[in-house]
Image (cartoon, helix red, strand yellow):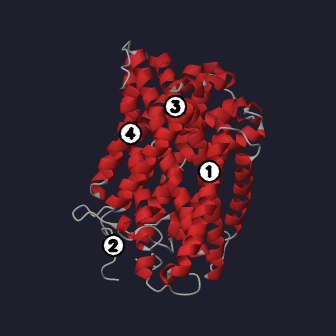
Amino acid sequence: MADEPRLEAGTIGLRHALSQGFIANGPLASVTVAVTGAAVFGLGALPLAFVLGSVLILFSVNTLYQFSRHVLSAGGIYAFTRAGFGERSGFATGITYGLSNLLLVVGNAMIAPRLVEFAMASAGVAVPAGVPVAVALVTVLVPYGITCLRLRPSLDYGIVTALLEVLAVVVLSVVFVVGAGSANTVAVFDPANALDGWSGLATGMVLASVALGGSDNVVALGEESRAPARTIKRGVLAVQLWVIGIYLLASYALTIGWGPSKMASFAESGSPLLVLVERAAGPWPVALIMLLALNSIVGVNVAVNISTARLIFDTARRGLTPERLAAVHARHRTPVAALTVAVLVQLAVLLVATAAWGLTTGFVVVVAAGGAGFVLVQLVNTAALISFARRHDLFGIWYRGVPAAGCVLTVYLLYTSVVPLELPRSIGVIAMLAVFAGCAGWASLVARSNPTTERDGVHGRPRQASRLGLDREPPA
């Protein structure tokens, strides 16, 4: 359709796709947020949780990589699942993925004040009463303002800061490992050192995979990339391999630096990375790392807003959410209405979680819910790749064998995230499952009344390939 809302095509290349992936991961943000969450369950076996989390994330990357060769859309994972299973599963998966991403922003906002408080206390400065609230709001509202502007400048900014973060994480990791001396040990790869053994290790593995995430946000740029099929798949793979290497080093260094037998107090400190920096170098380096970490958190939230808003935008122009959410800024060509909805959800969850459980317990509930959401999305999306391959006569281990193994693993991890039931942590997990089921039901109702939302690209050529994002890129 000529008047269909569109984003600005061909505006970014591989460099910007890499930037989106790296800032979505946010090395320093993940070390202070997602690694802290994984440590609650991984404890002295945190490095093993990251090794296993790497396996889980590589299953996901294979799904993204293979789909990116055939499906190009601002809807990203929503479009992938839709291509394999149809609108009902696609919409449910997309909304669950988007909400999981938004919960990551909330988790960042809940941990950021702890970083500032620690840095100020380390420097002997009293923390004014309003500082924690102000810091939390800044980490939500500043990214919103940035992502309302043009896409390319946001990603140009991100690639520079992401490289600085990578350098900081690697240097600090080396300092912690060298400083530990004879305390270096392979015992950190013993599952018995995790909370409740394999049970806690499974949850730690899921949260480790969240820390290793970021490459999934690259696929949302399919509509705005040059040579998108090539750009997106290369960006996904390159980002993920670099991220895995960084975090295998960092998780080992943090565990050794803290002490494997003392990891129960790791997450309770609120800002374990800064504690280790203070021990190694004193208060002023703490301030520098804190500022870099805050910048990293802002960067992660920028990337999350970019991908989630485009997902909402795509559902709106397909009639599954209100049409006005497909509004595009006349000058910047960004989905401003969808971005506004995303930030309002972030603020609402932040307020409710903090009021109900406080920053510390609320953080655990939020990241557990987000982790379970990502696993559920991975399960459905991976199964959708098998369905897509079968319907389009695509053969090979990467389309069928590897995804089947990934499905088995994610079913087990999803089970362990619910059983045994543990309140209040399990509240968020149950809520994510309810969101998925509710969205599937809503999509079914809409699809019955709107024929344009029927299954796409499964029983032959879609009606409007450019709209649905299933057109194949011509050979280079």
Going by the numbered disc 2, the residue's amino acid type is Pro
* Horizontal and vertical percent position of residue 94: 53, 63
Per the model, the C-alpha gap separating discs 2 and 4 is 29 Å
In-image side of 16 versus 263 (left or right): left
Which secondary structure, mark 1? Answer: helix
Per the model, the C-alpha gap separating discs 1 and 4 is 24 Å
**Residue occupied by mark 1:** 431
**Residue occupied by mark 2:** 5
* Horizontal and vertical percent position of residue 191: 75, 36
- Identified at 60% across, 46% down, the residue is 369
Q: Residues within 10 Å of mark 2 (few under 14, many from 20)?
A: some
In-image side of 168 versus 195 (left or right): left
In the rendered image, the quadrant that contains the C terminus is bottom left
Per the model, the C-alpha gap separating discs 3 and 4 is 15 Å
Name the disc covering residue 139, or none: 4
In-image side of 291 versus 463 (left or right): left
Per the model, the C-alpha gap separating discs 1 and 2 is 32 Å
The foreground one among 19 and 355 is: 355
- Identified at 62% across, 50% down, the residue is 431
Q: Residues within 10 Å of mark 4 (few under 14, many from 20)?
A: many
- Rendered image quadrant of residue 423: top right
